Image (cartoon, rainbow, N blue to C red):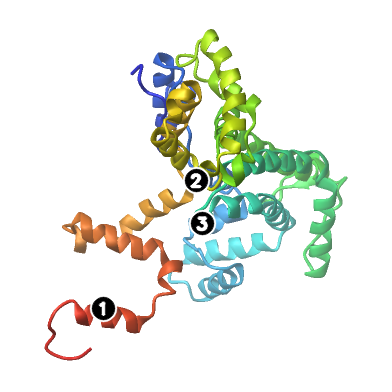
């Protein structure tokens, strides 16, 4: 257990729970076994947290509808008229009625604003050539944007909602009147309080808390500090202060004397390798570590090389890894449960790397297949 320097698995509470999860139990024995989850998957979990609540999407999800809203309305209208059971007709009628309320429109616009703010981060995390430093920066920026929307965005959002309702002939209520529930019960709170506090603030607080929980400060810092070792663009992202902070996160690997030695090593390391043509065209940390061993630099800079080894074993999963797991359930199913590893690997590459395969001509594949062995006929 003392040798563990990284943890990586899914985001279920029994695994990554802060108090009783496997992550927490391992950290009790070894504080240097840092946990990093796939950022793309974490963002997905952040977004869906409020969709599972009593929002419009939650109601539609109960009926199994996953198409666009216009198609949902068309299907619900058909069920309302031609449903096989009275209960189905009543449910369809209730959902269609909810679609024409101010509550629904407000939720819809709120969800759109959240998705709009997280869109840039989402697209970046889907890239195969993911820039770790930029990803960490976008995480912080998205968090700040969500907080800004929480503090100052209600008035602007409400204005958009009211304008939309006027355009589509949806009933608008006075904000200072008491809020009336869907069942016609009059409450003691105003419509302003209902929409601003009970809906807007609640959803945004839930989103910000979940975002902070999923994208912990430690995991974001780890990736940011890790990027400072990158040799790309002639060590353009090298930052000595970040690398010193990275060493402080591994208290079992660097004592005070070694950390003082690291300060001097980093200074000499940067100036020596920055001017070395052999190190100016490297593509990543793994290339850097291999070349350091080949050229004997790992003996000249033992503390820097120790940092490199710690970074290399840190389990950072990207969206590509998540895609591979998703593909497996489509390929290795009941009809193909005895598929071999080689064939499974080839099939997964064909499924995952669709962009690369689009450049391959069908005629070239046919010619290659024809020349593999003697065929009875010409393809």
Relative to 302, say whether 230 is above or below.
below
Q: Residues within 10 Å of mark 1 (few under 14, many from 20)?
A: few
Q: Is residue 299 left or right of residue 281?
A: left
Describe the element under mark 1 as helix, strand or loop.
helix
- Of tags 2 and 1, the one toward the viewer is 1
Q: Is residue 225 left or right of residue 174?
A: left
Camera sees residue 53: no
Residue bearing mark 2: 41
Q: Is residue 349 left or right of residue 188?
A: left
Q: Residues within 10 Å of mark 3 (few under 14, many from 20)?
A: few
Residue bearing mark 3: 61
> How far separated are the C-alphas under marks 3 and 1?
47 Å
Query: Between disc 3 and disc 1, whose residue precedes?
Result: 3
Q: Residue at x 56, y 21 (%)?
A: 265
Q: Position of residue 256 (x, y in %)?
A: 55, 9
Query: Between disc 2 and disc 1, whose residue precedes?
Result: 2
Q: Position of residue 180 (x, y in %)?
A: 75, 48
Camera sees residue 107: yes
Q: Position of residue 166 (x, y in %)?
A: 83, 66
Q: Is residue 124 left or right of residue 198?
A: left
> How far separated are the C-alphas under marks 2 and 1?
39 Å
Q: Residues within 10 Å of mark 2 (few under 14, many from 20)?
A: some
Residue bearing mark 1: 368
Q: Residue at x 39, y 25 (%)?
A: 22
- Of tags 2 and 3, the one toward the viewer is 2
Asked if disc 2 and disc 3 are in contact, CB closer than 8 Å, the reply is no
Q: Which mark is on residue 334?
A: none
- Of tags 3 and 1, the one toward the viewer is 1
> How far separated are the C-alphas under marks 2 and 3?
21 Å
Describe the element under mark 3 as helix, strand or loop.
helix
Could you tell me which quadrant the C terminus lies in? bottom left
Describe the element under mark 2 as helix, strand or loop.
helix
């Amino acid at each position: 257990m003392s040798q563990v320097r990284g943890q990586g698995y899914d985001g279920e509470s029994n695994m990554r729970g802060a108090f009783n999860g496997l992550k927490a139990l391992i950290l009790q024995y070894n504080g240097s076994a840092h946990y990093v989850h796939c950022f793309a998957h974490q963002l997905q979990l952040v977004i869906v947290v409020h969709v599972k609540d009593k929002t419009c999407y939650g109601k539609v999800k109960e009926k199994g509808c996953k198409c666009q809203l216009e198609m949902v309305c068309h299907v619900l209208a058909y069920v309302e008229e031609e449903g096989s059971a009275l209960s189905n007709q009543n449910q369809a009628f209730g959902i269609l009625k909810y679609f024409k309320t101010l509550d629904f429109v407000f939720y819809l616009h709120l969800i759109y604003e959240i998705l709009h703010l997280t869109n840039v981060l989402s697209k970046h995390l889907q890239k195969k050539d993911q820039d770790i430093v930029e990803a960490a920066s976008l995480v912080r920026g998205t968090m700040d944007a969500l907080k800004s929307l929480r503090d100052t965005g209600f008035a602007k959002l409400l204005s958009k909602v009211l304008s939309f309702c006027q355009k589509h002939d949806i009933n608008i209520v006075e904000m200072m009147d008491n809020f009336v529930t869907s069942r016609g019960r009059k409450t003691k709170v105003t419509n302003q309080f209902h929409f601003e506090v009970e809906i807007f603030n609640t959803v945004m607080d839930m989103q910000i808390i979940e975002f902070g929980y999923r994208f912990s400060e430690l995991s974001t810092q780890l990736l940011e500090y890790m990027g400072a070792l990158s040799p790309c663009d002639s060590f353009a992202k090298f930052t000595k202060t970040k690398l010193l902070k990275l060493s402080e996160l591994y208290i079992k690997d660097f004592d005070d004397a070694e950390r003082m030695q690291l300060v001097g090593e980093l200074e000499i390391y940067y100036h020596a390798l920055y001017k070395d043509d052999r190190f100016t065209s490297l593509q990543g940390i793994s290339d850097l570590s291999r070349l350091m061993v080949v050229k004997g630099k790992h003996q000249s800079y033992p503390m820097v090389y120790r940092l490199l080894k710690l970074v290399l074993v840190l389990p950072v999963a990207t969206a590509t890894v998540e895609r591979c797991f998703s593909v497996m359930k489509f390929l290795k199913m009941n009809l193909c449960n005895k598929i071999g590893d080689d064939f499974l690997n080839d099939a997964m590459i064909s499924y995952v790397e669709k962009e690369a395969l689009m450049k391959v001509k069908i005629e070239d594949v046919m010619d290659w297949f024809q020349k593999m062995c003697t065929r009875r006929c010409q393809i």
